Amino acid sequence: MPRSQSINQIHRPDALPDFRNQGVMLRIVLLSNGMALAVALLQAASWAEIGQRMLGISALLQPILLATLLLLFVLAPVLLRLPYRQGVAATLLLVVIITLGIFHLGGQLYDLAVEPGNFSSWRYVLLSAGATAVLLVYFKLRAQALSPAIHASRLQALQARIRPHFLFNSINAVLGIVRADPKRAETALEDMSDLFRMAMAHSGDLVPVRQELALARQYLALEQLRLGDRLKVSWHTENLPDDALIPPLVLQPLLENAVYHGIEPLAEGGAIDVRLYRTGNEIHLEMYNPRQEQGSHHVGNKIALTNIRERLALQFDIEARYTVETGKDFYRVQIMLPYVKDKENTDEPR
């Protein structure tokens, strides 16, 4: 069986932040401008002067910030391989060089007052180095709060919320046919045993998408024993790469939600449409099912959907998106994830 893999999206406490992560870059921009606003407030003598001060600070800050983010994005793989102290030193040196370069290239634009001994340039160097040090301390403290041990325990706790629901519904599916067709029920129990073995085997943050598809199809086979022709599923995975990795137990709870709250209450049943595909560096998961607006015999507690949303936030920060669209007679879930490759099993067929 393919091994699961950790994305290490939240780094160990003794590592630099991942400067290619959108959440990290957004936090750098917001915190840097927040510190600039604080300086403007301290320098201003009146409310009207705050905007002028902020504009003057931004004239130097924004070019430095943009150039720094671009270089950190390019050099991120190299910086992450360095020991923590060397990585911090390299980052600070990079910021100092960029600050001096932009300050001197800007000429008199930034040196409004005549100050001897290059005081202005060194003042800005110290300010930029100090701001960088504050940001690195912030990311280190954040990494400690979201250390791998805490990260793993939170993921396990979140996944545990799904499994009892998963278990009870699968047992009910088998009980629905145990009297009418005992032999078929025996086969279904064997399938359920395999299904739970797969579900409980997830130990990493990410698993091969083909493994999740196999688990989902096995779950649907159990539900079709109970619902028969009332349950139809349309799969669209032609544009999904075999080497894609996704979080475990994401697809199955969505299908369970679609069956339990969408198909089962409808006397005539319905069809679930599942689409998984890659667009650029993103993996998209879309699921559509009909629903009954009034009189549903199931009232959802949304545990599974909340679980998925929390796990995506833990693993991918703002790089994952989760949207739900509800109409009078339909329910649609759309999830976007970064495309993470399974480097160990890229040649295995799905």
Image (spheres, rainbow, N blue to C red):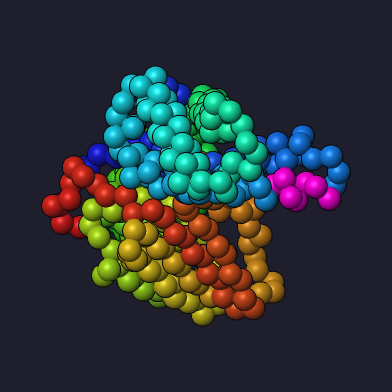
Instruction: Specify the quadrant that holds the C terminus.
Output: bottom left
Left or right position of 267 against 16 = right
Q: Position of residue 263 (x, y in %)?
A: 51, 70
> For the point 24% across and 47% down, which residue is it?
342
> For the point 45% across and 24% down, which residue is it?
13
Q: Position of residue 175 (x, y in %)?
A: 45, 54
Q: Quadrant of residue 310?
A: top right
> For the point 51% across and 80% down, which residue is it?
268
Q: Which residues are magenta?
A: 48-54
- Say if 66 sits above or below 141 in the image: below
Q: Position of residue 143 (x, y in %)?
A: 50, 28
Instruction: Specify the quadrant that holds the N terminus.
Output: top left
Left or right position of 212 against 43 = left
Q: Nearer the viewer, residue 128 or 310?
A: 128
In the displayed image of the protein, which residue is found farthest to the left?
Answer: 347
- Magenta-span inclusion, residue 53: yes
Q: Is residue 172 visible?
A: no
- Say if 150 sits above or below 218 in the image: above
- Say if 317 sits above or below 84 in the image: below
* Dominant secondary structure of the residues highlighted in magenta in the image: helix
